[in-house]
Image (cartoon, rainbow, N blue to C red):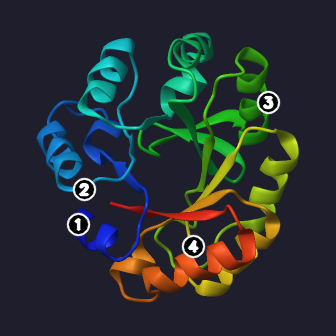
Amino acid sequence: MARRWVDAGASRLHLVDLDAARGDDPTANRRAVEAILAAVDVPCQLGGGVRDDAAIEALLALGLSRLVVGSAALKRPDWFAMACDAHPNRLAAGIDARDSMVATDGWLETSQTRATELAQDLRRRTGNIAAIIYTDISRDGMMQGPNFEGLAEMAAATDIPLVASGGVTTLEDVRRLAEMGMPACIVGRSLYDGVMELGEVLRIAGDVGGKSSATTGD
């Protein structure tokens, strides 16, 4: 699948280790990640189970361009800030929200922290965070469109580059995100289900957003 998306024009891939995100062995899927990196020649970012320095060092050593840190960014913000400073612009915060509140541990738990408050707190702690991957988990995989209001609220709350994720279903969704000034969005299920064609997604993202881009999710 990684080769398929790159052959179709993808210039970046977004990978998620769901097993590791839910607390399983964080090394179990590393061979699969290595195989993807060996198969394609585009930058790849990975999220899921990135919770300590050892994981960061091991995953970056594989050749990943960027890592997405989710639960640990909320639960250990001091550590995350230090990790960002140690690896400038290589770590992104994966902020997953349920009703505007941060969800953690593979979406199994919901915190009492607002997503926008976490973003602002992380910015105060470090200037070296690469991006925020913002996902409304009620929309992810539901083919109902992104939470545009939540994305606009997050974009207004921080100057950290914002990647829209969750529910990007139609070409109109992509167009609207680009018109909002989103620098990137992650597109997954709609490509696998054939609802959108990647070439058209990339064309619209480029035509409307200029530097905006769509990242395919594996």
Look at label 1 and name its amino acid: Arg
User: Disc 2 designates what residue?
Assistant: 40
Residue type highlighted by circle 2: Val
What is the CA distance from the residue labelled 3 to the residue labelled 2? Answer: 35 Å
Residue 5: horizontal and vertical position, in percent? Answer: 32, 70
Check disc 1: other Cα within 10 Å, few if <14, some if 14-19, many if 20+. Answer: few
The three-letter amino acid code for the residue at tag 3 is: Gln
| Mark earlier in primary sequence (3, 2) | 2
Relative to 168, is 40 above or below?
above
CB of mark 1 within 8 Å of CB of mark 2?
Answer: yes
User: Which residue position is annotated with label 3?
Assistant: 120
In 3D space, how far apart are the residues under numbered discs 1 and 4 (Cα atoms)?
A: 22 Å
Evaluate if marks 2 and 4 touch, with contact meaning CB atoms under 8 Å apart.
no
Q: What residue sits right under mark 4 in the picture? A: 168
Q: Position of residue 72 (x, y in %)?
A: 50, 24
Earlier-in-chain disc, 1 versus 4: 1
Disc on the earlier residue, 1 or 3 = 1
